[in-house]
Image (spheres, rainbow, N blue to C red):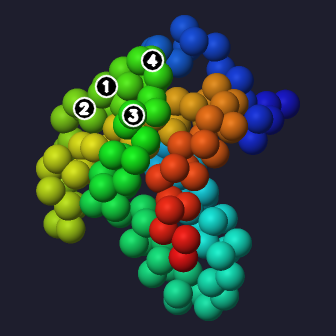
Amino acid sequence: MTDYFHLNIEREPLLNLSSLSLAHLGDSVYEVMVRSWLCLQGKARVKDLHRATVRYVAAPAQAARFGRIEPMLTPEEADVFRRGRNTAPHSVPKAASRGEYQTATGVEALFGWLYLQGRTDRLNQLFAAMIEEDGE
């Protein structure tokens, strides 16, 4: 049985995944991390949790926070980010510019890529740099 919480996919199969597949998974990884962080911050009301989650996971917020981690990326991580960012989007949400949406897609591809490798320590390191300065 596959343990989907502790994956360790080898490099070759990862290279065969599309950037949009990585971003699809990374979007949920990032959102679970945001939701966990918000719960630990003591936000108790569901309405407040939902609004705060949306504020942090929206493309403009992810794009703005990317600058916090960009200098920390290894060359391989930067390549994964660029591959995700350079994927042509099918559509762009009204609340985001094309550039913000593409940057967010790159961040999500990176988070998906790290998750599939089981690199949770690195995910936590990058997430902390992106979000914990806010100290909500």
If you read the primary sequence from the N terminus, does the residue marked by circle 3 or circle 2 appear first? Answer: 3
Residue 131 drawn at (x, y percent) = 50, 59
Alpha-carbon span between mark 3 and mark 1: 17 Å
Q: Which residue lies furthest to the top in this view?
A: 12
* Amino acid residing under circle 4: Glu
Among the 4 quarters of the image, the one containing residue 132: bottom right
Residue at (24%, 32%) from the top-left corner?
Answer: 87
Residue at (54%, 43%) from the top-left corner?
Answer: 126
Q: Which mark is nearer the camera, 4 or 1?
A: 4
- Residue situated in front as seen by the camera: 51 or 121: 121
Q: Which mark is nearer the camera, 2 or 1?
A: 1
Residue 2 drawn at (x, y percent) = 79, 31
Q: Name the residue under label 2.
A: 87
> Mark on residue 76?
4
Q: Residue furthest right?
A: 1
Horizontal side of 124 relative to 98 (left or right) equals right
* Amino acid residing under circle 3: Pro
If you read the primary sequence from the N terminus, does the residue marked by circle 3 or circle 1 appear first? Answer: 3
Q: Mark 3 points at which residue?
A: 71
Residue 115 drawn at (x, y percent) = 61, 35
Q: Do the residues labelled 2 and 1 touch (CB within 8 Å)?
A: yes
Horizontal side of 12 relative to 117 (left or right) equals left
Alpha-carbon span between mark 3 and mark 2: 22 Å
